[in-house]
Amino acid sequence: MIMRSWTLGLCAIAYLNGAAGVRAESPPPAKCATIDAPRAIGGTFLRSVNNRGEVLGSYIDIRLTTNYFQMSYGFYKTFDFPHAGFSTTSAAAWNNQGKIVGSYYDRKGGFHGFLLDRGLTIPMDYPGAADTYALSINDKDQIAGVYTDSQGKRHLYLWKAGKYMSIDPKGVRDLHMLGVAINNLGHIAATYRDSDGEHTYLSINGGRSMLRTSGAQTHFIVTGLNDRDDIVGNCLGEAPQSPAPCYLWRRGVFQRLTVSGSRGPVLAQSINNQRQIAGFYFDRGGMAHGFLMTP
């Protein structure tokens, strides 16, 4: 069903320079809109924005049921995942053709990735994995995600032309993968944890460039990557009483993005080629609101 009723509001963005030791720049004023689904009782969550500015998200209704929606040019439509075995479903990202990837938890107790293409659901399971999560998709139908092996360790994978490939960083042992995103150039941004903490890198043609972080940014977790190699992500591990910030990494510079008026985590989920960033934040009462900002 297509509906037009949306609650759209302006939200101010407070910019803070990155931690000491990281080059900072003065960004121009940002544009930001708060997006609330009209039937949302338990919050609205934006998950992904494509290059046309179309948004993929979810909201919780009065029955405490999670509903998924697509929004385009002020119109939105809700939809259901057709796979009857879905128990708990989480959409992670979509591309410019409207193909959606995500994960679901089945009734037998395992996580599986999926690709939703024009109503057809394709389950995704890395061979031999205990759990599989599909987290990012580009316009070439290349999917990046995380799988858990039989020993409980997580690894990166790339699904390309119907084949799975493990793409763990070389030389890293005992890694625990946290976040990954892929763009239309095939570049991959990822965060992994080893015995020394979290590390974030951008991989281009097999080479790795580590993102220079300090302070709170050492907990930076990748959630989105565009074709300009701009990266968005969130910081974990900070003091619970302080709002967790999200960051935009652009040409070696971290910009901290904090929604004014938020009283909890601000979580960036996606960035498109126009540098529109989709995500959600929590207000004083603990309600989640979607946001779409352009730094």
Image (cartoon, helix red, strand yellow):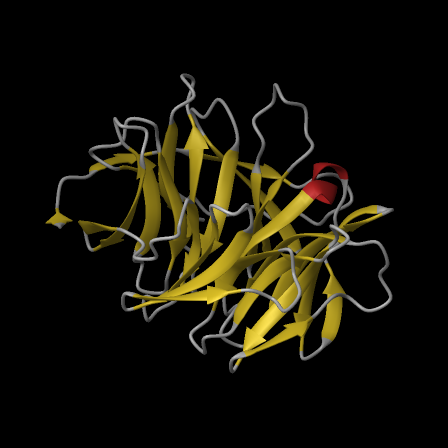
Does 92 sit left or right of 74 as displayed? right
Tell which residue pokes out farthest to the front in this image: 108
Looking at the image, residue 96 lies above or below residue 13: below
Q: Residue at x 46, y 64 (%)?
A: 123
Q: In the image, 205: left or right of 272? A: right
- Residue 184 drawn at (x, y percent): 49, 74
Indicate the quadrant where residue 109 lies. Answer: top right
Q: Find residue 16 and report its horizontal and vertical position in percent.
A: 58, 36
Q: Residue furthest bottom?
A: 161
Residue 32 location, quadrant = top left
Q: What count of labels does the image hold? A: 0
Q: Nearer the viewer, residue 12 or 29?
A: 12
Is residue 227 depicted above or below 92 in this figure? below
Q: Residue 190 in the image: x percent, y percent?
A: 66, 59
Identify which residue is drawn at 28% across, 26% down: 41
Report if residue 186 is visible in the image: no
Which residue occupies 19% across, 51% down?
77
Is residue 194 visible to us here?
Answer: yes
Residue 189 horizontal/vertical position (percent) = 63, 62
